[in-house]
Image: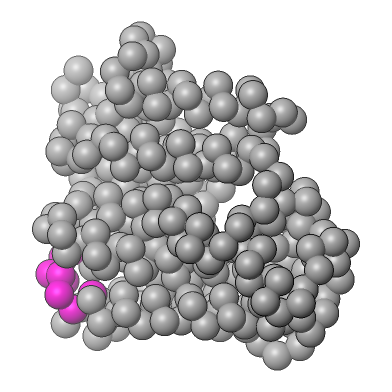
Amino acid sequence: MSAAAAPPDNVSFCADLVRSHDFPRYAATLFTPAAERRALLALYAFNVEIVRVRDQVSQPLPGEIRLQWWTDMLSGHVHGSAEGNPVAAELLRAIRDFDLPVEPLSLLADEHQFDLYNDPMPTLTALEGYLAATSSALLGLAGRVMGAPPDAADHLARHAGLAQGIVQVIANLPRDAAHRQLFLPQQVLESHGCNMEDVFAGKATPNLDAVLEQLAGEARQHATTALSLLAQVPPSVRPAFLPLSQAQADLKRLSQPGRNPFALLPPSRLRTLWTLWRASRSREFTK
């Protein structure tokens, strides 16, 4: 089926899915050309489907089966039903039209198997490996859609994705703690004398503040490196990395003195749009 004849429902389905479940990434696509936007929405809709598996199952096995369907689809082992799935159909189209590598997508799905279990994230190195295979990989693919040379896109995407991912770990702490799931590295908790059960109980302590400040510092370093690398890619590519500006804004908000780390304070959609619009016109993204 040609791109012109592709069912518009698939495009709308992916756009609605991303807008509902990952508004910052959806909003970032509004600053990209139509053809690239469609491919980006396919990537982000795929990511939403993978991330949502955790909340759609009550036991790990059904979750693993759902994730395996996606890896099988990407390897060409699912026939018929792939084209019938609007996200899969759009993803396959994006892979074909922009010559995207399949391996990072499969690894992204595999890495999210960690989400299905309540094992703690052991070390900061392990967390960075997880985020590199998820947040960074997604940004790297977005960069390729926008025409970035693979090497430049991947180096930039690694640091931008680590910054974005660490900020999400901090922001998602209330939800994760309520599920007795820990993405805060156990090694970092222990180094600051922070008790895991206190985190699960939602207790805000100076020890936890120290943990979160260390992670925030890591995120700032990666964001600074990513911004320095942004100048090495053409301005036409940089909109793929607009989510980094939202991560920086979120980090500033989440690092306010006296903030309760267990209080959910998501930014409004209007503020998200304003943040991304300002970034899109900034020197970093245009010069």
Q: Is the residue 119 above or below the residue 49 in the image? A: below
Residue 82, image x, y percentages: 37, 18
Left-right relation of 34 to 82? left
Left-right relation of 23 to 231? right
Give the residue at x 52% y 59%: 127
Q: Quadrant of the N terminus?
A: top left
Left-right relation of 60 to 283? right
Give the residue at x 79% y 84%: 206
- In this orientation, does residue 273 appear? no
Return the residue nearer the eye: 143 or 268: 143
Q: Quadrant of residue 183?
A: bottom right
Q: Which residues are magenta?
A: 230-237
Magenta region includes residue 178 = no
Question: So how many labels did they put on this image?
Answer: 0
Q: Main secondary structure of the magenta part?
A: loop
Q: Quadrant of the C terminus?
A: bottom left
Residue 244, image x, y percentages: 40, 70
Q: Is the residue 170 above or below the residue 50 in the image? A: below
Q: Is the residue 122 above or below the residue 71 in the image? A: below
Residue 116, image x, y percentages: 64, 38
Give the residue at x 41% y 42%: 108
- Residue furthest toward the top? 80
Give the residue at x 39% y 56%: 132
Residue 51, image x, y percentages: 54, 42
Left-right relation of 256 to 21? right
